[in-house]
Every structure is written in C-alpha cells, then in structure tokens.
Amino acid sequence: MLYPLIDSQKWSETYSLKIESVQCVCCKKYFTANIPVAFESYRGFQIADHGCSPEYNYAYFICVSEEKNREWDGLVGNII
C-alpha cells in the first residue's frame, strides 16, 4: 500500500471520495478516515493507527481503472 503525500481535500476532490467519520468496531471510538491511500488501481482513505490491532484500521477504496471497472461490471452482470 502507498501513502501519497497529498492534501486530503485534494485527494478527495481528485477521486470523488468522502472524508468520513467511522467507529472502530474494537474500541468503539470515532475516527476520521482522511489518510490518502493507494493500492494497485484503487484509491481511498483510511483512519490513523490508534492502538487497536491493524485489522481494525478502517479503510475504504474505489477502483480508478476503467479496465477493472469493466471486469467488475461483467462479473456483477453475470450474477444478477
């Protein structure tokens, strides 16, 4: 995973992502998912490490690859 050095607001505007507040399912505290993150053809935000195990560090992504989006559309279309 890559952590681009870019302003969260700019990242949000570039990829049409929302900066959102989320609750950790482990400690029940609220955190803002505003750390830009990139993984392969996905872009998103995650919360900061806050002391709970890494599996509780919430992140969400969107696919920015047209090719990958077409693949997913094909898979979903075949299921429905």
Image: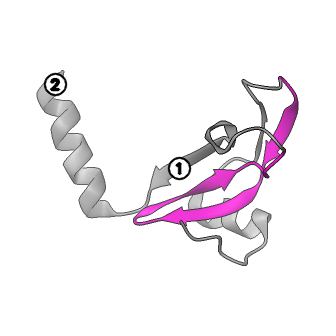
30 to 66, vertically: above or below: above
Amino acid beneath label 1: Phe
Q: Residue at x 76, y 30 (%)?
A: 24
Could you tell me how far apart the alpha carbons at marks 2 and 1 are, in whole angstroms?
22 Å
Q: Position of residue 13 (x, y in %)?
A: 68, 63
Q: Which quadrant, please, contains the C terminus?
A: top left
Give the residue drawn at x 57%, y 61%: 15
Q: Outermost residue, bottom direction?
A: 5
**Quarter where residue 23 is shown:** top right
Q: Secondary structure at mark 2?
A: helix
Callout 2 amino acid: Ile
Of the pair 74 and 44, the residue shown nearer to us: 44
Which residue is located at x 78 percent, y 63 percent? 9
Q: Which residue is mark 2?
A: 79
Say whether disc 2 or disc 1 marks the residue closer to the N-terminus. Answer: 1
**Does the magenta segment cover residue 41?**
yes
Q: Secondary structure at mark 1?
A: strand
Q: Is disc 1 surrounded by few (<14), some (14 to 19) or many (20+) residues within 10 Å?
A: some
Q: Position of residue 43 (x, y in %)?
A: 53, 60
Magenta highlight range: 28-50
Q: Is residue 45 above or below residue 5?
A: above
Q: Is residue 77 above or below residue 35?
A: above
Q: Residues within 10 Å of mark 2 (few under 14, many from 20)?
A: few
**Circle number at residue 61:** 1
Q: How is the image coloured?
A: one colour
- In reply to whether residue 46 is colored magenta, the answer given is yes
Q: Return the residue found at the far left.
A: 78
Give the side of residue 38 with respect to residue 9, left or right: left
